[in-house]
Image: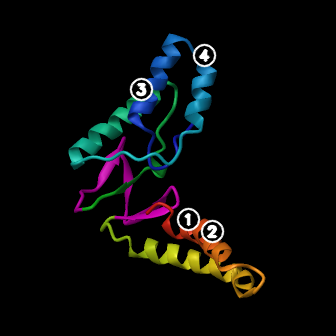
């Protein structure tokens, strides 16, 4: 069994491991862990990140899971040395998509803003026939923009 990229949450795995000991069966805990994916570890320093990653590895092993090093990635906002875990190199990346948003090492979000504006423009284009209709009142058209365009443009902003 493998954890999905980048790594599993230390706290979450620790809590699930405690639940297993208290009152839940191994099968239920393994089911929950099998569905843990795309979780992020954040740290202030490279040393702190290494410590967290090793804690994840240890907690995984306690519940019978193996950390998949090939799927583990590192995104750093500054220079970082090459990493190895159990002799396997850990890939360093410049960006990744998490919960639908692109996160970059330099913190640039202009591409996300442009993407949201383009999505809003697409919704407006789809509503074009409604906006051109003389049978629909202006307040209704304004309501449609607020209900259908604004959420697309402002989502996760």
Whether residue 62 appears in this view of the structure is no
| Quarter occupied by residue 86 | top left
Q: Which residue is mark 4?
A: 25
Question: Are the two marked residues, 2 and 1, in contact with CB atoms closer than 8 angstroms?
Answer: yes
Identify the mark at residue 14; answer none if there is no mark: 3
Q: Earlier in the sequence, mark 3 or mark 4?
A: 3
Going by the image, does 6 lie left or right of 33?
Answer: left
Instruction: For mark 2, give the secondary structure.
Output: helix
Instruction: For mark 1, give the secondary structure.
Output: helix
- What's the CA distance linking mark 1 and mark 4? 42 Å
Front of the two marks 4 and 2 = 2
Q: Earlier in the sequence, mark 4 or mark 2?
A: 4
- What's the CA distance linking mark 3 and mark 4? 15 Å
Q: Earlier in the sequence, mark 1 or mark 4?
A: 4
On the image, the x and y values in percent for residue 59 come to: 41, 28
The magenta-colored residue range is 78-104
């Amino acid at each position: 069994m493998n954890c999905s990229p980048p790594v599993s949450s230390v706290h979450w795995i620790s809590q699930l491991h405690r639940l297993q000991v208290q009152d839940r069966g191994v099968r239920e805990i393994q089911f929950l862990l099998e569905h843990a994916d795309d979780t992020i570890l954040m740290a202030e320093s490279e040393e702190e990140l290494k410590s967290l990653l090793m804690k994840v590895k240890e907690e995984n092993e306690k519940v019978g899971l193996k950390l998949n090093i090939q799927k583990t990635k590192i995104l750093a906002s500054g220079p970082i040395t090459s990493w190895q875990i159990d002799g396997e190199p850990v890939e360093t990346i410049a960006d990744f998509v998490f919960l639908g948003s692109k996160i970059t090492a330099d913190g640039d979000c202009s591409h996300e803003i442009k993407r949201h504006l383009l999505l809003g423009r697409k919704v407006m284009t789809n509503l074009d026939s409604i906006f051109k209709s003389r049978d629909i009142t202006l307040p209704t058209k304004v309501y449609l923009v607020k209900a259908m365009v604004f959420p697309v443009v402002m989502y996760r902003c």
